[in-house]
Structures are given as C-alpha cells and as structure tokens.
Amino acid sequence: MNGHTTTSDGNVVIDCKLQQVYYGEFLAVRDSHVPIEKGKITGFIGPSGCGKSTVLRSLNRMNDLIRGFRFQGHVHFHGQDVYANNVDPVVLRRHIGMVFQQPNPFQMSIFDNVAFGLRLNRYRGKVSDRVEQALGRAALWDEVKDKLKNNGLSLSGGQQQRLCIARAIATEPSVLLMDEPCSALDPIATRRIEELMIELKRNYTIAIVTHNMQQATRVADTTAFFSVDMSKGGRTGYLVEMGPTKEVFENPQQKLTKDYIAGHFS
Amino acid sequence: MSPGTVPAVERGVANSATGLRGGTLSLQRSPLERRTLLSALLTCGAWAAAILASIPLVSVLYMLVVRGGARFDFRWDMLVELPPAGFETGGGFGNAIVGTLVMVGLAAVISVPVGIFCAVFLAELGPHSTLARAVRFAAKTLTGLPSILAGVFAYASVVLVTGTYSAPAGAMALAVLMVPTVVLTAEEAMKMVPRITRDAAYGMGCTRSQVIWKIVLPTALPGILTGVMLAVARAAGETAPLLFTALFSSFWLVEHGAVRLMQPTASLAVLIYNFSGMPFENQIELAWAASLVLVLLVLFVNIASRLLGHRRV
C-alpha cells in the first residue's frame, strides 16, 4: 500500500518525517525531518526533554509500548512506512536493533544472552559461531570466552553494555539504535564503546542519542540538534538543525545551535 | 586509638550537648544524655520484642522434637503403618503422610497454573483493567478467608456433586486457599522485573507473549516459587477445610496397586486433630510424632524451593 520511496538520496536507510508525536495530550515532538544514512553514525544531541529519545524510539516503534503514544508523520525504512497498518512492530524490531541507556542483560548466561535473538528467529546455522562472532565484534570475546556460562549480570557495567551490543548485533540487524549507551558508564568503558561504534559502522547504520557533546564530535558523522519550544506553554521538542558533525559544531546555521554548543543554553 | 590523642577532649560531660564547652571540642557523647538513654531503651525494646516473638516458635519446635522425637526412637515403622484403633498399641500414620502429599500435590496442580496465569493477566496483560482490580480485590480478601469456608466451598462443589468425601474434594479446598497466595506473590514478583529488561526483550523483537514466557516469568521465578512454597506450606498444615471434604480414613489410598482417590482420605493435620483429643496415650504420642513429621515436611518443601529458586540467579 505504501510502496513509494521518498528519498532522492539512495543512501538514506531510515527517513523519518515526523509531524507530531503525542503522549496522551502532551505534544512531545513536532516537525522534525531526520534522515539516517547508511553506514554512518547519526548523533542526536540537545537539552533534556527535547525529544531526542522519543524520536529515536519512534524509529523502531518502541514507543508503541507507552500508553497514549500517537505518531503523526511517517518513518520510511528502506522505503516502507513502518507505521503502516500492515507492519508488525515485532518484525520491524528484528531489523532495527536497540541498545539502551542502562545496560540490561537478561537474567541468563552470557552465551544465552547473545543467542537469545538467534533462537527467537529460529536461526538454523551454528548458534555458537554466531555468538562468538557477535561477542568478537562487540570487543568482549577475549574477556568472556572462558566464562560464557556465567550470568550476564555478573559482568561489570561496561562489559554488560558491550554484551547488550553483542546481543543486538547477533541477529545482524541493518540499523542499531543507541539511547545514551554510555551515560551509565565510566570514562574508560565509554571510550571502549565509542571505539566499538566506529568499528561497527562498517557493517551497521547507527543512530545514537547522547547528552555528551564531545561524544557526538568524537563518533558522529552527522549530527541532529534538537531543542525545546516552550512558547505555547508546553515543552515540545523539535529539530533545529542537522548536518555533518563538523559543520554543525564549527559553523552552526542557527543561533540556538550556536548558543547550545557554546554552552549558553541551560 | 585512645581519646587522649585529641587534646582537651573531655569524657562524659552531661551538659555538652553541642560538644563544645569552654572552647574545647568534645567528640564524646555522655552515657547519661537523654538521646543516649532513649536510644539504648529502644534498642533493648527491639531485642526484647524479637525474643518474645520467637518464644512460641522455639517452644513449639522444642516440644515437637522432644515429644515427637521420643516416640520415634529410631523406629521408622510408624511412617509406613496404618493408624491404630482405640486400645491398640503401635501403629503409625503412613496413610496420612500419603494422603497429605497427594492432596497438597493435587491442590498445587490445580492452583499453581491457575494462579500463575492469573498473575500474568494482572501484571502484564491488563494491569489497569476493571477485571484486574476486581480480581486483585478478591484475591486479597481470600487470603484472609477463614479456611473452614474453603472447606464449605469444596463440600458444596465436590462432595455433594460426587456424593463422597474424597482426596480431590480436600485438594479443591486446599487449592482455594492456595490460589490467592500464588496470585499475589507471583504478580508482585513479575512486577519486580525491571522495565529495562522488558524493553530489552521488546527491542530484540519479542512478541508480548515471548516477553512474558521467555523473560518475565524466568526472571521472576524465584519470587514465584517463594509464593508457591508459602501456599504449599500453609495448605499442608490446614485442618479445618479437610474435616468435611477429605474426612479421615484408617486405610491406604492405594490398595492392591489401584489408586482409589474417591474415598475418605487421611491427612496428617486431621490425624493430629483427631488423635490429640483421644484419651489413649498411644494416639497422643502418635499425634506428636505426626506433628514433627508435618513440620519436617514443610521445612523440606521450604528448603527445596529455595534451592530451586537460587539456581537461577
């Protein structure tokens, strides 16, 4: 029903044209066009409550789980509107993986955590090979190869987060969404995850929400800056500016962006 | 470290509430100060209350071991023998052990699936629905239900319908008592599974039922087992609901290789109740011994479920 492709640029994997997002009566985000390009890291930055997480979670329909969520607009994933009636969010989420703010391994062994998605999809090949491969890509294999039977929750915070990344990439999704993946981690663990992201972008398209602007400059190829509009009494987020990271940071087109980057913004 | 390392620190001056007196710093609290006394008093009170609360338990256990154990005297035959009649000596309560195990087992088979499915509904499917509110209210009320009323329910629904006192009737009465405990603890345990764990499962592309069966229930398993164990322990010790559902019997539930459930069935609790009121020394001793066995049985269930629950962590 909704087969038309929207983008002239063939490199756009997810084209999010968001008009309005509501939680109940609350207008959370409005008017944001966020194209996410293949093989790149797109960073979402902006002050608290600017809706960057909401936008990210709209891409794989994680917000469907929140009561009162309404999405107006469209999100095209490889040309298909993910909000079309015939799209099953469960199937969609198997193509668009997600890593969360808090490391959230399952209460099961390290191996089972990574194998979880494979088993869910009834993977027919050798599960242990794919588990090793995923843990290797997540730069965790050497640390856990001798204790794959240990509980995933017994690892340190940074290791847990890399385990979650391994779990997410084991099923080879084409896109990886990361919602402030380092905010619960110490600087060394953060560094490792950042290196990992740059590694991963060879195979995956990544969108990452971050509070940390230095992190955006370190990892993101493209940066989207969101802000909060309080003019109508609400707190509505919207996209202010989006472009190559270097340009957004060194030569911002909007005064809001300039102020935020210079630290003049609360 | 002695206090003397800080010069001019004074010991126990009653009016040095701020610790400062005459410009010198005192880092010590007077033992006679009001808050010191109050603190000591409350601590003593808490200790006393804790000891007081454990007196009944300890004394019951003591009596069980002394009086129940005396009868045992390393003769295990009473675990496999039938109850004695009036003036007989010897005998045992083998059929009551079997009866209790069978009825509690049947009750668990009925109540655990019902309770867990019910908890899945309450915690996951429709936590805010009117039905859920009604069920929660009913379950909370039922936990305080006088157990004899569960017996009345089973009497009307099983005994009158089947026309006989039986093990299933007793099991039904016990199941009615177990369901609310299982429901409420399982719901609580499932609610304790963190939101971020569910998010992870949904993010992996789980359907709602996969999230529940593969993630939420296994993660909540220790808590659910605790609830089941509490329910089993309570059911095993219940007497009133069995009095007019399973009644009592001096015969085996299994005879000549055939299980005959549809007949009056003995249980440890009812045996204790019956025998403890008899004027015969033999029966009273057996009642003590049966009490000890019942407590050990409950203890065993308790420990087993803990081990099961911990293996997952």
Image (tube, rainbow, N blue to C red):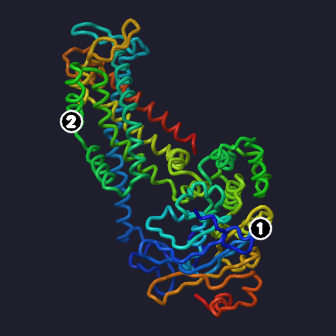
* x 38%, y 24%: residue: B101
Q: Is residue B93 left or right of residue A103?
A: left
* Rendered view: B276 above or below A246: above
From the viewer's perspective, is the residue at label 2 or at label 1 nearer? 1
Instruction: Please state the chain letter of the residue tagged with numbered disc 1 in the rendered image.
Output: A
Residue linked to disc 2: B149
Which residue in the protein does label 1 denote?
Answer: A39
Q: In front: A85, or A137?
A: A85
Could you classify mark 2 by the number of other residues whose Cα lies within 10 Å: few (under 14), some (14-19), or many (20 or more)? some
Q: Is residue B23 visible?
A: yes
Q: Residue at x 69, y 91 (%)?
A: A253
Work out whether A139 lies above or below B275. Answer: below
Percent position (x, y) of residue A158?
69, 61
The x, y position of residue A17, in whole percent, is: 60, 75
- Classify mark 1: residues with Cα within 10 Å, few (<14), some (14-19) or many (20+): some
Q: Quadrant of residue B174?
A: top left
- Output the chain of dot 2: B
Query: Are the residues tagged 2 and 1 within 8 Å (C-beta)?
Result: no
The x, y position of residue B251, in whole percent, is 30, 11
Q: Amino acid at mark 2?
A: Leu
Instruction: Name the quadrant of the N terminus of chain A.
Output: bottom right
Query: Considering depth in this image, is B261 or A178 the residue closer to the camera?
Result: A178
- Tell me the amino acid under the disc marked 1: Gly
